[in-house]
């Protein structure tokens, strides 16, 4: 978990600056700690590249739509 957190902290500002990225968090990916990058729509996936793994930490990009605080 510590390595996943380190990778997240190193990259999250850069990823959040990408148009369409709405959140970056830690979660479980295939039973391993990983990073989940949430994006607004599926079109974003074909236009942008985020690696699927960094420093042996898996990264998953998922479409969540826009996230708003209530």
Image: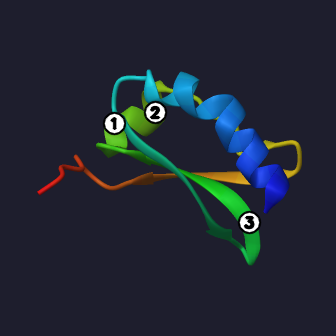
The residue that disc 1 covers is 43
Image side of residue 8 versus residue 21, left or right: right
- Distance, label 2 to label 3, CA atoms, is 25 Å
- Please tell me the numbered disc located at residue 33: 3
Residue shown at 35%/23% (left/top)? Answer: 19
Crowding near the residue tagged with mark 3, few <14, some 14–19, many ≥20 C-alpha atoms within 10 Å: some
> CB of mark 2 within 8 Å of CB of mark 3?
no
Check if mark 2's residue and mark 1's residue have beta carbons within 8 Å: yes
Q: Earlier in the sequence, mark 3 or mark 1?
A: 3
**Image quarter for residue 36?**
bottom right
**Number of dots carrying numbers:** 3
The numbered mark at residue 64 is none
> Does 57 sit above or below residue 11?
below
* Label 3: which secondary element: strand
- As measured in the structure, the alpha-carbon distance from the residue carrying label 2 to the one carrying label 1 is 6 Å
At x 75%, y 41%, the residue is: 7
- Rendered image quadrant of residue 50: top right
Q: Residue 20: image x %, image y %?
A: 33, 32
Which quadrant, please, contains the C terminus? Answer: bottom left
Quarter containing the N terminus: bottom right
Residue drawn at 32 percent across, 55 percent down:
64
Give the colour scheme of this rendering: rainbow
Q: Residue 46 has which mark?
A: 2
Tell which of 8 and 56 is nearer to you.
8
Q: Tell me where residue 14 sits by quadrant.
A: top right
């Amino acid at each position: 978990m510590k390595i996943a957190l380190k990778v997240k902290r190193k990259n999250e500002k850069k990823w959040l600056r990408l148009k369409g990225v709405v959140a970056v968090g830690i979660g479980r990916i295939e039973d391993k700690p990983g990073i989940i990058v949430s994006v607004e729509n599926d079109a974003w996936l074909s236009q942008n590249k985020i690696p699927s793994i960094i420093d042996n930490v898996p990264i998953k990009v998922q479409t969540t739509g826009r996230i708003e605080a209530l």
